[in-house]
Image (cartoon, helix red, strand yellow):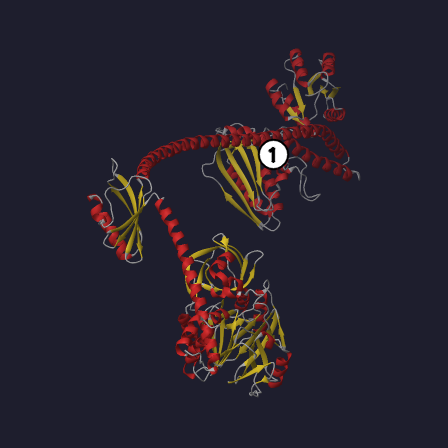
Amino acid sequence: MQVQQSSWSPASGWRHVPGLRDAQLVLVFGDRNAIGCDRLVADLAAAWPAAIAIGCSTAGQIQGTDVTDEGAVATAIHFDHTSVAVCTTPVNVRDSAQSGALLAERLSRSDLVHVLVFSEGISINGEALVRGLREGLPGRVSVTGGLSADGEHFKETLVLSEGRAQRNTVAAIGLSGTRLVVGCGSFGGWDSFGPERQVTRSSGNVLYELDGQSALALYTRYLGEHARDLPASGLLFPLSLRTRDGSAPVVRTILAVNEADHSLTFAGDVPEGGYVRLMRANFDRLIDGAVEAGRISAEPAGAAGVDLALLISCVGRRMVLRQRVEEEVEGVRDIVGARAVLTGFYSYGEISPFTPGARCELHNQTMTVTTFSER
Amino acid sequence: MADFHSLLRRQLKRHFPDDTVPAGLAPMLAAVDDAYRQFDNDREMLERSLDLSSQELLQANAELRALVGAFPDQILRLDVQGRILDIKGGGRGESVKQWHSGQLLTEAVDAGARPAVAQALARVANHGEPLSVELELDTDGPTLRFYEARLLPMEGAQILMILRDVTERHYAEKQLRVSQIALHEAHRDLERRVDERTAALARVNDELRREMAERQAAEAARGQLEDQLRHAQKMEAIGRLSGGIAHDFNNLLTAIRGYSELLLRALADSPLRADVEEIYHAAERAATLTGQLLAFSRRQILSPEIIGLNQRVMDMSRMLNRLIGEHIAIDLRLATDLWSVRADSAQLEQVLVNLALNARDAMPDGGRLAIETANHDVTAARAHALEIKAGPFVELRVRDTGVGIPTELQARVFEPFFTTKPKGQGTGLGLAMVYGFVRQSGGAVTVESAPGRGTTFALLLPRTDDTTTDRSATPRQLAGPRHGAGTILIAEDERALRRLSATVIGQAGYRTLEASDGQQALDLYTVHAQSIVMVVTDVVMPRMGGIELAKRLRQLRPGLPLLFVTGYVEQSDALHDSAAGTPVLLKPFSPDALLLAINKALLPSE
């Protein structure tokens, strides 16, 4: 397995001459303008004519330990023993589960090992998408990926696949072969605070009331003057959601705000009857969380080491960490080793099991690391 | 630089007092400024969150305190030694006396409750599981009260004890238990009474069912008896009808046979003799049929004698074997100590032959024919159904393994001319003869059969205690017809028979006078009394019958020889009763029989 990275900008194209021309797969992450640029698609096709190029718009793309906001980064991968298939389908909030099921059906084959999915980031029920994928795939097949992003704007996200960058699209890669080793891990590092509140009115991933009070009013009160920056500022106060007694809480962040009906749209379902608490960041714990995710993901590769690490972190983490954001990338680098090529992006939602073999779920506010290597 | 964060401006002022900040530091200073501002934002947000959370916590705390304060239960927080840390709640009700923070619970409670409290505290502290105990504690009030103490383990090696006054509930439960016991007793009493009533009801029900079953059985039996009675009445009616026909035939056959005999005597060498012989034989066959019809109608002339049925069956078995063929095996199952019967031996043999032939026809592919005898006491009810007298009977059962008789046909098998055999193979008189014979002998016959399961005919003949041999002594051999002298008055309403009698008697040398009824005969006798040596009279005639005629003649001439001629066997019995000693000649008779009877009647007077 060989991996080579190149950066690209609309103004100057490739920063270095791209290598690894016989790559089968190119992962491309960039800002919305770069991903939506026709020239990028043409340059990708020219540089890797036989490769499947797939990627999405981001809230910051990762190249090595650098996190950049402009241009795009392309990571070309040549597998020695692994075959690659791609599937792309439209998606929206209502039929997210069906889209997931369709992808699972199209990509299924007996030696399928892993599915990498990149999705529309706003008009989506990420939890339903993951459910559709999970129910359509055999339990042995792992799924990771993320929801595309649009910086801190929350206006429009794009998915690049099969030569086109489109809105309301979900694309997935199926990796098949007996010698591919995939590891994955996800960790947050946020602390819950304040009283636990019950979800008293919601519909799917749209939340209206907590303890009979407006959820939007609660956020406005806690954000103070930053409430004007909703929904982006809502990322500073994600929700810890517990749907039933004893279950592990999941983190939910705001994707959109509707002032008209005082509702908040989250990346996943917020079912009525569930209990939520506000969460706040703790810098050290966020970075520790990223390191923990890297450690879990690197375990399957063992001593042979990791060739490629795909880091998908939450835009909320970036907004909190600001200038320290690269510390969490460096933390992962320290775990997976200097040989591994690091790529990835800051997203509106992360898709991964907490640990390998666990149930794949949609997360928010986590660092999700997927490692690849071939035996 | 003037736009930088105040802290950064102060630091720059301290390190670069004369505003000599190198231009190359500008990007770095911008980043530091951004970081400071971010820290401020974060701090501001954190402080606001803390403040808001604190407010919410305070409010929740106040609400909780209000809630707990309004709670009727007392809530005690204890350490693991059972020391009271604080007491909350108990908003109403009577408080437990003299409890306060710092007190050991095991010392605070009444002496009697201490072991239970100590044990409960130890269990909760050691096992970390909640439990409840009921305590009886002294209060500030006048009486002891009952409490439910619920102990729950808490974080920090503490125990929460919720003390609830359950005095009212305690007494209510006690009262409830008493009521339950009473209710249980009442329930048991009720169940016992219900059981008794149920048993009584069941007995009445059983009795009722039994009565209903008996009634149904009685009704069924009555229905069966009615069916049997109807059948018997039908058979009686058929018998009367066929008997009447047979009687009329007898008159005609007597004339045909008599004239045929006369003709045969006259046509010794004539070519017409063969034709006359045919007429004679036809008349003979017709007489046999008529005889069977009379047998069915119980008008056969019987010669009853005491019979040992077993011996008679054994005697006939070989003949029956030949009769029915070797493909049918005969089983004899004869009872020992079988009672005797009184019956016409020849007729009985004919009965056995008829039944055996029927069995043969029912078993074309072979089978078994069982002939059984048994003693049988017939009950009154069965006797009534069979129209016989109750008492001892000998039963003769003839059973085959043949095709059987369909149920709907079984009631008709004894009817004359009823047959299921192909045309020309049966007269339909065999079983009718059996029926008539048995009935005439004072018995009854029944049939049991089912298609494919054979047929059983059961004949019941009355037992006789008479042991005397009544086989008539061999009749004195009379001389053949002889020529007589004198006038014989013949009274007969059937012209042909009257003419035949006159011809036969005339050919025997007597003169004859003919009357078509009793009155005419009496008139003729009055005129020719001197020459009349004998009167031959029919019994049933118009105007005056034979019995009345005989009575009148006896009044006129007591010793006058008389001969009754009749076709009715029951009349012959009546004649025996009313005119004892007067001989009777039964139709059909041959010319010789008439002459022999006349000779016999004339003998005493000669």
Please tell me which residue lies in front, B508 or B273: B273
Q: Secondary structure at mark 1?
A: helix
Can you name the residue that lies furthest to the front here?
A: B18
Residue B539 vertical position relative to residue A283 in the rendered view, above or below: above
> How far across and down, in percent of the image, does residue B371 sit?
53, 42
Picture coordinates of residue B532, whole percent (x, y): 71, 16
Q: In the rendered image of this protein, does residue A352 appear above or below residue B514?
A: below
Residue B180: quarter of image: top left
The amino acid type of the residue labelled 1 equals: Tyr
| Residue A183 in view of the camera | no
Give left or right: position of B488 versus B382.
Answer: right
**Image quarter hosting the C terminus of chain B:** top right
Residue B478 in percent (x, y) is at 62, 28
Q: Residue at x 59, y 37 (%)?
A: B351
Say whether residue B201 is left or right of residue A4.
left
| Residue B350 figure quarter | top right
Name the one closer to the observer, A125 or B521.
A125
Q: Is residue A334 left or right of residue B497?
A: left
Q: Residue at x 61, y 18 (%)?
A: B578
**Residue that lies at the very extreme toward the right in this rendered image:** B271
Instruction: Report x, y in % for residue B524.
Output: 74, 14
Q: In the rendered image, which quarter is residue B135 located in?
A: top left
- The count of marks equals 1
Chain identity of mark 1: B
Q: Is residue B63 visible?
A: yes
Seen from the viewer's position, the closer of residues B285 and A68 is A68
The residue wearing badge 1 is B435
| Residue count near mark 1 (Cα–Cα under 10 Å), binned few <14, some 14–19, many ≥20 | many
Residue at the image point whose x is 22% and y is 46% from the top? B108
